[in-house]
Image (tube, rainbow, N blue to C red):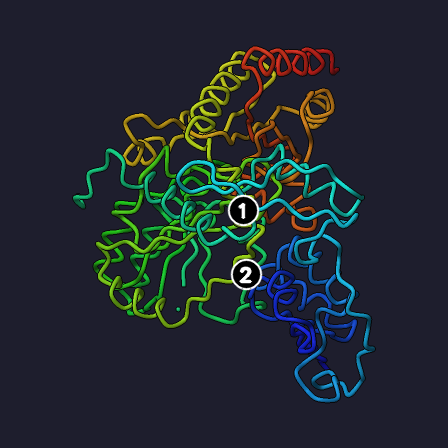
Amino acid sequence: MLKIVDLFPAPDIELEARRKHTSGESIISVVIHPKDCTSVARSFWQHSGDGISSRRAELCHQAFIDGFLVASNDVDGTCRNSGHPVPKRSLKGPLRYQKGKMADGVEDDPPIESGSHASIRKEKRPRNGDESAQFVEERYGRNLDFSLAGKAKLAIRRRIAGGLTANVDFNRTTEITHSTINVRQVPGISEDDWGPGCQFYGHGSAEDLDDLESRCQGGERFLALFCEFPGNPLLKCPDLRRIRALADRFDFAVIVDETIGNFLNIHVLPYADVVVSSLTKVFSGDSNVMGGSMILSPLSCYYRCLKSIMGVEYEDNYWAEDALFMERNSRDFVSRIARINTNAEAICDCLRASEHVKEIFYPKYSSTRIFYDQFRRPTGGYGGLLSITFRTRPEAVAFYDALETAKGPSLGTNFTLSSPYTLLAHYGELDWAAQYGVESNLVRMSVGLEDTAYLCKAIERALEVVAKVK
C-alpha cells in the first residue's frame, strides 16, 4: 500500500515568515512505498521528470523539522492514506529567515540596486554556520537577491532565446526513439517501463530510417520521434532533414535534444517541432544546479496546439534558489562555449596522433559529420564531448587511470571530466550496449575550461603510460 504525505505551510505561522520560507511555491508530497516496489519507484523518479531539487529538499526538510511545513491541511494533521499523526514541532525557523534580523540582533541591510536588473545584498559578515554558505554565494558568487527569482527566470529565458535567434535563417529548406545510447534514455524506453508502442533505433543510421519509413508505409502510426543531436556517447548525428521529411509525410512530431551540441554551436529548431536541452550541463557549467528547457518551434504544424496546451498545463515549479544559481552560472555561457570548443579539438588532435588510440568519437571526425555541419552555425564548433576507445582493455585502463582530470559521470562541467562511460551506464548490459557500437572499454571526456596546453600535456602523459603497457 502506498502512503502519500502532503506538506503545506503551517497555517499558524505569521504570513511573512511563511512567504520567506516557502517562496510561494507548490506543496511537497512524499510517497512512502513498500520495499518490494523500490525498483519501480526508482525508475519513475529517474525518468518521469517529477521530483524536487536538492536545494528545495534541503530547505523543506529543515522547514519540516522547524514546524514551517505540516502534513496536509486536515484539522487533525493526519497523513493521507496513513492515519498516522504528524508530531507538532516548535515554530522556530532558521535564523536567516527571521524577518529583518541577523543572529546577533543586527538589522539586515536592505537590497541595493546594481545595474538595470540586479539587486545584490550588501556585504555582511557571516554570523554562524547556517549563514556561511549564503554569505559566500551572495558576496562572492554574485547571486541575485532571493526576491528577484522571477527576474532571474526571465533572464534565463531571454539568454536562451538570444542564442536561438542570433544570425539565423529560419527558412525551412505510439513514440520512436532514434539515438545513440544514453544512460537516461535507454533504460526508460523499454515496454516493461512504459508499455507497448515504443520503438528504439540505437544506431541512428540510414538503415534505421529505412525501417521506420517501411513501418509507416505499412500502416503503423507513431506519435513522436525523439533524438539527440549529436548522440551520447558516440557523438553521431541522425539525418535530421530526412527525419523532418518523414515526419511531414506521416504526421508525427520531432523532438530534438540538442544538449550535447548546444544551441550556440548548432541550430536545429527549423527542423524540429520541439527542442529540449539540459541546462544542468554546459549552460550552467558549475555543476551545482539542475534545470531544463523546452522550445516550441513556431514553424511546426503542432505549434498552436502545443502552445495552447502549455498555456493550460504548464506549471512553473522551478525552485527560486535554483533559478538564481542558473542565472548566475549562465552569464558567461557564450565565452565558455568558444573555449570548450577549442580545447576539445586540441585534445582530439593529440589523440589522433597516437598509434594506441583505436577510434575517437567526435562530431568533427564522425562519419555523420555531414549531418552535423548542415546545422552548425557559422561561428559554431563541435562541442566539448568526445569518446575514445583503445586496442586492448589494459591500454584503456592505463589511460584512464593516468589521465589527470576529474573523474565522474556527468558532462558539460567547466572542468574536464572523464568517465568509463559504458561500465557506469550499462554495467549490467554490456553485450546489449556492444551491439550498438558502445564498447565496454570506452572512455568519455567532457572537456572544460582549463588551459589548452595543460590539457594536451595531460593527454600526452596518459598516452605515455599506455605506451608502456605490454
Q: Earlier in the sequence, mark 2 or mark 1?
A: 2
Question: Which residue is rendered at x = 78% and y = 64% of the image?
Answer: 92
Tag 2 secondary structure? loop
State the image coordinates of residue 359 (x, y, percent, origin top left): 53, 25
Give the class, few, some or many, for how many residues have Cα within 10 Å of label 1's Cα (few <14, many ≥20).
many
State the image coordinates of residue 215 (x, y, percent, origin top left): 33, 62
Question: Which residue is rendered at x = 41% and y = 43% of the image?
Answer: 258
Q: Nearer the viewer, residue 388 or 121?
A: 121
- In the figure, is residue 186 to the left or right of 339? right
Q: Amino acid at mark 1?
A: Leu
- Residue 381 vs 274, above or below: the answer is above
Q: Nearer the viewer, residue 144 or 298?
A: 144
- In the figure, is residue 219 to the left or right of 32? left
State the image coordinates of residue 399 (x, y, percent, origin top left): 68, 21
- What's the CA distance linking mark 2 and mark 1? 21 Å
Q: Amino acid at mark 2?
A: Gly
Quadrant containing the C terminus is top right
Dot label at residue 49: 2
- Residue 274 vs 15, above or below: the answer is above
- In the figure, is residue 401 to the left or right of 375? right
Q: Name the quadrant containing residue 380.
A: top left
- In the figure, is residue 11 to the left or right of 149? right
- Which callout, 2 or 1, points to the residue nearer the camera? 1
Q: Name the quadrant containing residue 129.
A: top right
Give the labeled residue for mark 1: 324
Question: Which residue is rendered at x = 69% and y = 46% of the image?
Answer: 427
Quadrant containing the N terminus is bottom right
- Residue 248 vs 419, above or below: the answer is below
Q: How many marks?
A: 2
